[in-house]
Amino acid sequence: MSSENERQGGGAEGAGPEQLALIRETVRKAKVPKAKPRTWRGAALAKELPVARVVVNKGVLHLDQFFDYAVPEELDADAQPGVRVRVRFGAGSRNVRDGRREGGGLIDGFLVERRAESDYSGPLAALAGVVSPERVLSAEMLSLARAVADRYAGSLADVLQLAVPPRNARAESKPSPEPPPPPAPPEPGTWERYQQGPAFLRALGTGGAPRAVWTALPGPHWAAEIARAVGATLASGRGALVVVPDGRSAGRVDAALTALLGEGRHALLTAESGPERRYRQWLAVRRGAVRAVVGTRAAMFAPVENPGLVVVWEDGDSSHSDDNAPFPHVREVLELRAAHDKCGFLLGSTSCTVEAAQLVESGWAAPLVADRTVVRAAAPLVRTVGDGELARDEAARAARLPSLAWKAVREGLKSGPVLVQVPRRGYAPRLACARCRTPARCGKCAGPLGAPDERELTCAWCGTAERDWHCAECGANRLRAQIVGARRTAEELGRAFPAVPVRTSGRDHILDSVPGQPALVVSTPGAEPVAEGGYAAALLLDGWAMLSRPDIRAGEEALRRWISASSLVRGQDAGGTVVVVAEPTLRPVQALVRWDPVGHALRELAERAELNFPPVSRMAEAIGRPEAVEAFLKAAQLPPEAQVLGPVPLPVPDPGRPRRPGDPPVGERWERALVRVPPGSGAALAAALKAAQASRLARGGGDPVRLRIDPPDIG
């Protein structure tokens, strides 16, 4: 036998690459017997409460109900309300042996109740197993999840997927520490700057449940003020929950709480923590070892024991609206928690949303503001540059930055860093009057007008063509649109100030903080880093781009972004200056100059009440293929007072860009219809849409229709 034949016949150790690949493929295809899950056929049932009521992890609406299962005696001790279980689902009623239903696929769920008898008259399947004896779902959390699902026309299983994090066995096996005793009530500190600030803390410290909309003063003290509110609540023996829009804000509140109360009194629940550490912290809260929680959006469902205060910071930030069904908003969920748990509520921001103003106007919450003299001292000096000045400014025509902005930068760099806020690329403009800049609105439903084919004006809400548009304010008939991005800003500033370092903060790389030395910091909205000692000046460029977004919230959002950036600037007494490049006569610009976000929100609320816009009315959207949306709306038994706007076509996404949540698939044309109801009919609207969607899914077939109650972007 040749040496070559010896190598070929030498077994697996001497096999060549082709033979090894063949061996691996043979092993891979071999049918290895698998252990079958137990069916508990013939097993004795639990002597007491032998029926388990389970919510299965099936988010489809027509299965939004509890299912009963038999509890084998072997699982009796572990199968307690609140634990995770595995069950057989989808077997039907044909496969029954020895009085037990068998078959179906294994699926996870939560055991919510033990009962003596079942409402179902047929044979029950047995629990396949208890995943863990850890009780992760409380009765209070189940009630909250049910309320959220009903409000947003969603399923209980989908809400529980958001409320209860995935299990981590290693974290679950470690015991939680003993809860520390309540701390001493903190001093009011900087809360004394607010008219009712000390009284709010006293109410929390004595077991009260005050509700407040807090307009925070500019500066770095908001995190410490939240920490003092949490400390006062803990001193009363109750728990507290704080939800912020991003990890940077969570880190600031975390540091403030640690400095005030010390280690071990609160948990930090953010995505940056990692699954094991985050689940371990969540378990400490569920077990009662920790009474205070700080976190981002998912923390709105944190199982705080005996809650005394819930806090949401910057409720206007889009991060507070969940991208997963049923798309709950942090503000609304915490309002439900405050009502259900009868605890305090604090909605805080340096700005003010229309929803926050409505809470005060309705009397549900009280305003928590500072005196105007205190506001003027804490806020920077705000100066404006309009289009008229830009047209006469040689420097602005050459480099897109007006002379006033150059002077502010030059003076600011003498004493510290200067912030330059530039809108992100991709803001789609809406049309406005070329003379007075009033947004162009539909004469039928007051929706925003656009020209998708660059020929005919069309309403983005109801689809009505507008052939003879005139401005309602000045009577002009000429329109304008403008897109200004962030291109070349950092390069232009670097060339203008070659001896000064230029730093950027944006989507790809967000800075958390910068030193107090002179520097130019170019940032997109929401990514502004904190400067040590505050910025000496700030430039808010391209205001028209922010105000031109095709959204009813464009003015509110622009003002929120501007105030958020300006709050990082030193106060007027310390020489802080802000220059905003926008038309001075516009309402958001005037509100920024006066530093009056509450007044702006109240005027917006009055205008929306006149036009029947949210939040005065309740609104829902249905998105899908044209024929699917039409069939869905015909089948839905909407309230008699419901008004359907549209449907109108959605923009076709660019194949080269990443698909955002809710975008139609590439190559498909989808439409959107809006359904509007007056106050008091929101629950009826949600119930009608949920019933129509459940019926549609139960029948099967047809293209999907996506529902969303209170969409954040309605055009």
Image: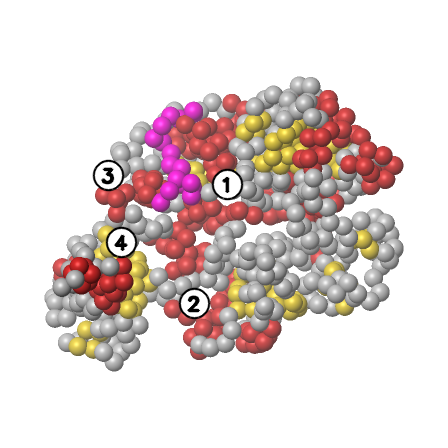
Q: Name the residue under label 3.
A: 175
- What amino acid does circle 2 point to? Leu
Asked whether 630 or 425 is in front, the reply is 425
Label disc, if present, on residue 246 of the rendered structure: 1
> Which residue is found at the position 49% from the left and 62% from the top?
153
Residue 129 on image: x %, y %: 21, 60
Q: 10 Å neighbourhood of mark 4: few (<14), some, or many (≥20)?
A: many
Q: Which image quadrant is residue 535 in?
A: top right
Q: Are the residues flagged by discs 3 and 4 in contact, CB closer than 8 Å?
A: no
**Alpha-carbon span between mark 3 and mark 4:** 17 Å
The quarter of the image holding the N terminus is bottom left
Residue 284 on image: x %, y %: 31, 39
**Alpha-carbon span between mark 3 and mark 2:** 37 Å
Question: Which one is closest to the eye, mark 1 or mark 2?
Answer: 1
**Alpha-carbon span between mark 1 and mark 2:** 31 Å
Asked whether 194 or 130 is in front, the reply is 130
Q: Name the residue under label 2.
A: 61
**Alpha-carbon span between mark 2 and mark 4:** 23 Å
Residue 41 included in the magenta stretch of the image:
no
Relative side of 117 to 345, left or right = left
Mark 3 or 2, nearer chain start: 2
Q: Name the residue under label 4.
A: 83
Query: Does the image show residue 606?
Result: no
Q: 10 Å neighbourhood of mark 3: few (<14), some, or many (≥20)?
A: few
Mark 1 or 4, nearer chain start: 4
Question: Which one is closest to the eye, mark 3 or mark 4?
Answer: 3
Mark 3 or 1, nearer chain start: 3
Question: Which one is closest to the eye, mark 1 or mark 4?
Answer: 1
- What amino acid does circle 4 point to? Val
| Magenta span of residues | 259-275
408 in relation to 488, above or below: above
- What amino acid does circle 1 point to? Asp
